[in-house]
Amino acid sequence: MSNVTGLTCVICDKTYPADFAGYVCTDHGNEGILDVRYDYARIAGSWTKADLDANRNRTMWRYRPLMPVRPDAPVPPLTVGGTPMYDAAPLAADLGIARVWVKDEGRQPTASLKDRASAMAVVKAQEREAEVITTASTGNAAAALSGICASVGQKNVIFVPKTAPEAKIAQLLAYGSTVALVNGNYDAAFELCLLAAEEYGWFNRNTGFNPFMTEGKKTAGLEILEDLEWNPPDAIFVSVGDGSIIGGVHKAMKDAVGLGWIEKVPRIYGIQSDGSDFMVQAFESGEDVLTKAPISAATLADSISADLPRDRIKAMAAVTETNGAYIRVSDDDILAAVPVMARGSGVFAEPAGAAAYAGLVEAVNRGLVTATDEVVVLSTGNGLKDIAGAMKAVAAAGTKPMYVDPNLEALKMAMQKGTNE
Ligand SMILES: *Cc1c(COP(=O)(O)O)cnc(C)c1O
Ligand SMILES: [Zn+2]
């Protein structure tokens, strides 16, 4: 078996055995998300930083002792994890802070961080010999599940809002998933998917429901720490929809503390659009996220649009237990961040990815991040995921191409006009 000691409800602390066949706490239903617990003493006794150094497998599976899978469980062939983290000196200079690293999750096989969770979902589903896997998604979790299922020939059924960006829908269709384009928002797709999974007995990958998704996503946090040789940054910026990524980043920090591999935990900042700010509202008002009513979300950063963040309990703890904050940015700020981040780091992000950078700008303005701070921006998805968003962003930045006839004279005139402007 793995090093898992049990699955603990985030509401009541009731603990279920490691091989529990359900997804959520039987006393708390869909809100009773389970947290996977590990025997850190046992893991630390047989696994060291030096073992990790010697491991040439650069994928997320290099952290297998900290994952809820058997040591010999087969994993999908796509290369998930091992994404680069760049020291973006121009951005740090712009902001007047010590250092900015950008971790580029757009480099994953289906171009977003969600591959980490979907790879985990496929392993768990195959462990249970599930015939079909399903998920609802704003687009990226679906594309990730779709691609990873394709790599192992696993049947899957996907529910996405029909308004999802075309590139994400194209991925689903190319990979050959059964695709339901739901006439409603993400929250409606989520509810329908839960009903369908129950009705048909499908393996359910949904975020903020399936307890193993966070355990896949946390590998991004472990990579951040390992890349920095277990010297944690001062702060990590993460955009938040359902709150599962931020919960995963927090889990990585708790795992590393549990193993005695780090002492200081970075401040974790959650970033939301002002059109989808459930977590920011709760952070500011102190309202209990469990009982707070859903909002009506609307943002062009589709990946972080959620009326009711499904993983909100873990998401709030990630910020409050690390002395971080929830920060609200406008859609205009998010759009502005797309070219700024692309030009200052070379990483071209979709709006939800750039939102984390917009949050860093706001944090600097508010004095939450200061001159000596070294921060990581988690760029969660590739800019090619949402071309309409990218074109809006460059238009807002006033960036225009030159239109030229194919001769040198015309080019010279255009160049001169360009530089005279
Ligand atoms: C899913 C997603 C997020 C938000 O993650 P949550 O776990 O829903 O908070 C942010 N950015 C991108 C690109 C995503 O796909
Ligand atoms: Zn419970």
Image (tube, grey):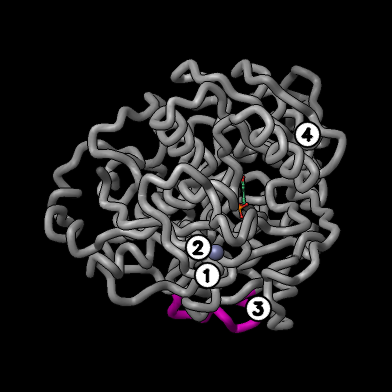
Q: Position of residue 18 (x, y in %)?
A: 36, 50
Instruction: Choose mark 4 or mark 3, whichever is in front.
Output: 3
Label number found at residue 12: 1
Instruction: Choose mark 2 or mark 3, whichever is in front.
Output: 2
Toward the viewer: 370 or 290? 290
Instruction: Choose mark 2 or mark 4, whichever is in front.
Output: 2
Label number found at residue 365: 3
What separation in Å lies between label 2 and label 3 (alpha carbons)? 38 Å
Element type at mark 4? loop
Q: Position of residue 233 (x, y in %)?
A: 39, 69
Rendered position, 376 above or below 59: below
Rendered position, 285 above or below 204: below
* Residue at which label 4 appears: 402
What separation in Å lies between label 1 and label 3 (alpha carbons)? 39 Å
Which callout, 1 or 3, points at the residue further toward the start of the chain?
1
Q: Amino acid at mark 1?
A: Cys
- Ligand 2 rendered quadrant: bottom right
Element type at mark 1? loop
